Amino acid sequence: MTEARIRLGTRGSALALWQTAHVGALLRAADPALRIETVVIKTAGDKILDVPLARIGDRGLFVKEIEEALLDGRIDAAVHSLKDLPTSQPVGLLVGAVLARADARDCLVSTAHASLAALPAGAVVGTSSLRRRAQLQAHHPRLRFEDVRGNLQTRLAKLDAGQYDALVLAVAGLERLGLHERIRERLAPEVSLPAVGQGALAVECRADDRATLARLLPLTDGPTLAAVTAERALLAAMEGGCQVPIGAHATLAGERLTLTAMVGSLDGSTLLQVRVEGATSEAASLGLEAARALHDQGAAAVLDEVRRAEGA
C-alpha cells in the first residue's frame, strides 16, 4: 500500500515555515498516517530586497514561483499568507482552503515608544506598505515613513540596531512567532485599516487534484471565507495588488457582514472610505458595491496618481 503524503510548498522565512507547519499539523490531525513534506521555494519578493515593493510591479511577487511548482507537479499544495495571494489564480489552480483568521490588525513595534502618539516629531517609522503609509501619514503627519524590507526577523533587527524609531507590522505574524511582547500598540482599523486578507492563511492546489482538495476543504473556516471573499472582490474590482494603498476589513455578526474599505494618497492628504452591509451569502456582491462606492468618490484618480508616483 502506497504511503499517503502531501508536499507543501512555502517561502523560507520563519513565519512562512510556521504557517506551513500549522497547516501540516491540521492535516495530520485529520489523518495521522499522512506524511507531510515541506518544500521551500524562493520567490522574487524574497530575492529582490533593495527595491521598494511598490516599484517591483509584480502582483504575484511572493507566490509566482510557488504556483509554478504547483503547476509542474513539484508540490501538491502551497501555503500562503492570503494578503500576498493575487485575487485570481492561474488556470489549473484554485484556493482549496482558507483557515480561521488571526488578529487582522496592524501594530506598532518600538524599543522606546509605547504608541504612535508618543513618537516625537520627525521620528522614522519603517513600513514597506503604501496602505499603511497613506493612512498613518494622514493621522500623524509629523512622522517620517521610510521603506523597510526583509523578513520579520530582519526588520526587527534593523529596528533594534537603531535604523528606525518604530515599525508598523501585522499583529498576526508577531503572534504566530511568539513575539507578543514586541507589540507596543495594536492599531484600530480607524487608524490603519488592514490589508485585504490580512491575518488569514490560504492553501492553494491544482484544480484537478481531487485527493488533495478533499483533504483541504475541511480546513476552511466559514466566517473567515465570507469576510475575505468580500475583501478580495473589492480588491479585484479596484484592479489593485498588495502594493497599492487599498485597505479592507470585513466583520461578521451572525449572518450579517460589514465591509469597510479605503483608498488613500501617498501623502495622506486624501483618504476615501466606505462601509457597506449585507448578508454573508452576498459577500462578493458587497465587495463590488464597496468598490463602486469608492470609484464614485474618485478612487481611480487617486490610484492612478499613486501608480505614476511609484513608477508602477
Image: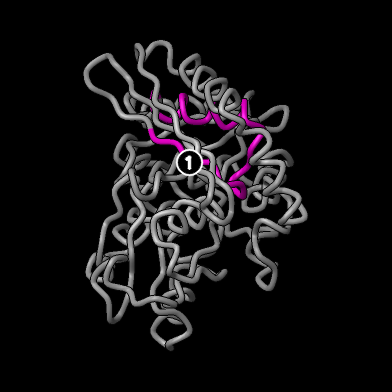
Q: Nearer the viewer, residue 253 or 141?
A: 141
Q: Nearer the viewer, residue 192 or 179?
A: 192
Question: Where residue 55 appears, x then y in whole percent?
Answer: 72, 58
Query: Does the rendering let one see residue 242?
Result: yes
Residue 248 belongs to the span the image colors magenta: yes
Magenta residues (range): 226-249
Asked if residue 198 is positioned above or below residue 50 in the image, the reply reads: above
Question: Where residue 49 appears, x then y in whole percent?
Answer: 65, 71
Asked if residue 106 is positioned above or below residue 182 in the image, the reply reads: above
Question: Where residue 240 appears, x then y in whole percent?
Answer: 63, 38
Identify residue type, mark 1.
Gly
Question: Where residue 22 appears, x then y in whole percent?
Answer: 36, 49
Asked if residue 44 is positioned above or below residue 165 in the image, the reply reads: above
Asked if residue 121 is positioned above or below residue 98 in the image, the reply reads: below
Which residue is under mark 1?
247
Query: Does the rendering let one see residue 5?
Result: no
Secondary structure at numbered mark 1: strand
